[in-house]
Amino acid sequence: MTVKNFINELQKSERVEGELLRTIFVSLIASFATFGLLYYTRLQNIENFIPQYGYFIFFSILSYVLVMPAIRQVRAFKKFPCMTGMMIGMTIGMMSGMMLGFFVGAVSGMFWGSVFGMGVGIVLGVWKGRCCGVMGVMEGMMAGFMGGLMGAMTAVMMYNDHLKAAGLILFVVCGAILIGLNYMLYTETKHEERQFSEGDFTTIILSVLFTAITIWMIVFGPKSPLFA
Amino acid sequence: MEIKKTTIYMWGTLLLIAFGGYLMMAGSGDGVTGNVVAGAGSGEVREFTLGMKNYNYYPDSITVKAGQPVKISLDKTAQGCFRDFTIRDLGVRKYLQKTSDFVEFTPTKKGTYTFACSMGMGYGKLIVK
């Protein structure tokens, strides 16, 4: 059974699937280390920092952590058929855009949440969608654009309702979809040879960079009038 | 007994999430406490009736004194989600279905609070001096 095979592959080291758990672990350490460094150098002086921003920063970090394994999987094979590439661009673009749009939109408002969510979604969607050419690029761009807008809009509309519970539900659903993408990539590539091997450098750099930018945006970034 | 690397990564990840979540979410509540917050302040009650103009609350800025009870109702021009009135930072939220419905509360701390409809489509400022 393919799901069982996929789970078995997660525990072996020959294929890229065997590196997915390590990627999550490394990304978490890099992101938390970045947060810890920023917290002890600057953020701890901000009044009410943890109650106000802690939840949203925590889930933003986890969002990036969930995207990292898919990035590694795509990089390992470089080229994919059009349909697969479109799914990659769409899933990565929309899920990252929606999650980041939601968590930034929840503290910065609809406009800035949308802009940030769209930015992250389009960048990641286009970058990963490139594996199948222009179709994947366009799909990644469209998905990132839509996901960013939808995430921020949902956050603002939930603002006076159960905002944090909605954030958790959104995160769980997006997480399940991203794990689904990992599985899909496994089924598409299980008979193919890996094209590219890499260490954890890219994962660390991306985690640090995205975490730092997101924290800056959430804490010091511009805010819409509703949140000013 | 040999422990697999993947087992270490998995438990390490779960521990990191649990530990990080505990540290980063300490003391973060939802903020909204429910319906009307009854005021027990002193002095005359300041009454405001808000309407809707240019797709926003009108007036969109009201000024009151700290410790003075405030009563807010909506006239019939406020439609849709605008009737679900909230002041998140003061724990005020009520669906003001009719023009006779109101919220009453007493802001005790000076500052500027945002009032808004439940979906954030309309908003304004409550200035407490």
Image (tube, rainbow, N blue to C red):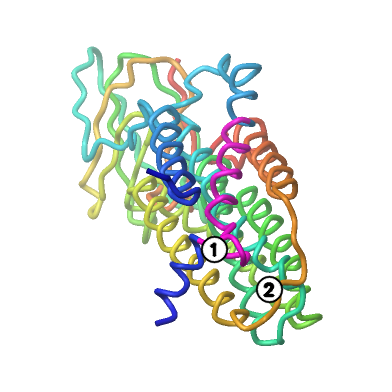
Chain on which label 2 sits: A
Q: Is residue A192 above or below residue B47?
A: below
Question: What x and y, as percent, mark residue B64?
Answer: 40, 21
Task: Residue at 35%, 26% (x, y): give it.
Answer: B27
Q: On the rendered structure, is B26 left or right of A206?
A: left
Chain on which label 1 sits: A
Question: What x and y, as percent, mark residue A120?
Answer: 68, 55
Count up the numbered dots.
Answer: 2
Mark 1 or mark 2, which has the lower sequence index?
A: 2
Using the rendered image, report if marks 1 and 2 lie on a common chain.
Answer: yes
Q: Which residue is mark 2?
A: A142
Could you give the CA–CA distance between mark 1 and mark 2, rounded to whole angstroms?
12 Å
What amino acid does circle 2 point to?
A: Met
The C terminus of chain B sits in image quarter: top left
The front one of A179 and B31 is A179
Question: What x and y, as percent, mark residue A86?
Answer: 67, 80
- Mark toward the viewer: 1 or 2: 2
Q: Which residue is mark 1?
A: A150
Q: Quadrant of residue B42?
A: top left
Report the predominant secondary structure element of the magenta stretch: helix
Task: Residue at 54%, 77% (x, y): give it.
Answer: A184
Q: On the rendered structure, is A164 left or right of A150?
A: left
Q: Which residues are magenta?
A: A12-33
Q: Secondary structure at mark 2?
A: helix
Q: Residues within 10 Å of mark 1 (few under 14, many from 20)?
A: many
Residue located farthest toward the right when viewing the structure as drawn: A134
What amino acid does circle 1 point to?
A: Met
Q: Residues within 10 Å of mark 2 (few under 14, many from 20)?
A: many
Q: Quadrant of residue B116?
A: top left
